[in-house]
Image (spheres, rainbow, N blue to C red):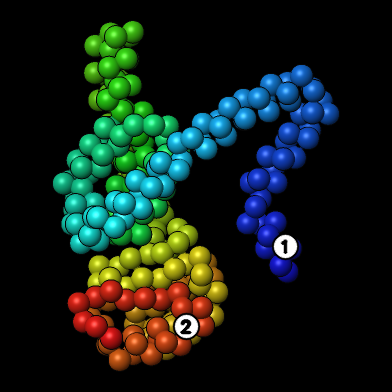
Amino acid sequence: MTMRKKIKENLFLIAVALSYIIIFIANPAMAIESVKGSGYYIKEMLMIMPVIFILTALLDIWVPKEKIMQYLGKDAKTKGVFLSFVVGSISAGPVYAAFPMCVMLHKKGASIRNIVIILSSWAVIKVPMLINEAKFLGPKFMVIRWMLTIVSIIIFSWITYKTIKDKDLPGEVLTQAGLHINRDACMGCTLCAKNYSEVFEMGNKKAFVKSYEELDMDRLENVIKSCPVKAISYNGDKEM
């Protein structure tokens, strides 16, 4: 069971390794060029990602959860969409550098829709890219392409928001009241859902937090203490 779980968790890496093996057998010259290209990007990542991780950690410490939820959360609406476009457009570096930051933002309450907008803006409408596009392809081309891209991002971010829920993503999920579940640690024991079904529910063999009106702090405290892997935490106004 453990081996099967490990294979499932690393299925993408296994598929990549098998692809390289097949290419080496079929076309060794192409395989060597592929390895060189992969080595270049790995070297680039090793130079960039440590800086990104440090900046992400600093933002995690400096920016309160309440601010993230206020400006990028589900209730931010138009303000959140606009700010997400700004954050993605002024960012620097390759798009994979955005993933750690977006994980941090989601943990602190940013909505899936705004995360998609940040990633998409980072990839296709960054300011340096627009400047070079206007220089080589002309301002008219740049403006029309930029406008169509903005519309497309808004549409696809809405579709993603309607299709994918917080419970579908790995890691820690934050609710409006400061209730956290570390879904990577969650072992799917169902104790929280059984003991406090008004707040907790199971989905994809992991616990997640439902919409609720108020919290019974005594019941919540019992649930947190009973979690065998300590995957649940609460950072609300009232101390437990």
- Farthest-out residue, right: 25
Image check: 34 left or right of 25? left
Which image quadrant is residue 213 in? bottom left
Residues at badges 1 and 2 in contact (C-beta under 8 Å)? no
From the image, tell me which residue sits under label 1: 4
Q: Residue at x 19, y 52 (%)?
A: 71
The count of marks equals: 2
Q: Secondary structure at mark 1?
A: helix
Q: Residue at x 19, y 57 (%)?
A: 67
Image location of residue 164, percent across then percent down? 41, 54
Q: Amino acid at mark 2?
A: Cys
- Indicate which disc residue 75 carries: none
**Compared with residue 28, is residue 177 higher up or lower down, i.e. above or below?**
below
Looking at the image, tell me whether mark 1 or mark 2 is earlier in sequence order.
1
Circle nearer the viewer, 1 or 2: 2
The residue closer to the viewer here, 32 or 72, is: 32
Q: Secondary structure at mark 2?
A: loop
**Compared with residue 197, is residue 179 higher up or lower down, i.e. above or below?**
above
Q: Residue at x 76, y 19 (%)?
A: 29
The quadrant in which the C terminus is found is bottom left
Image location of residue 222, percent across then percent down? 38, 90
Image location of residue 30, percent across then percent down? 73, 21
Which image quadrant is residue 63 in? bottom left
Whether residue 233 is visible to the viewer of this picture, yes or no, is yes
From the image, tell me which residue sits under label 2: 227
Image location of residue 155, percent across then percent down? 31, 39
Q: Residue at x 73, y 23 (%)?
A: 32
The quadrant in which the N terminus is found is bottom right
Image check: 73 left or right of 194? left
Q: Amino acid at mark 1?
A: Arg
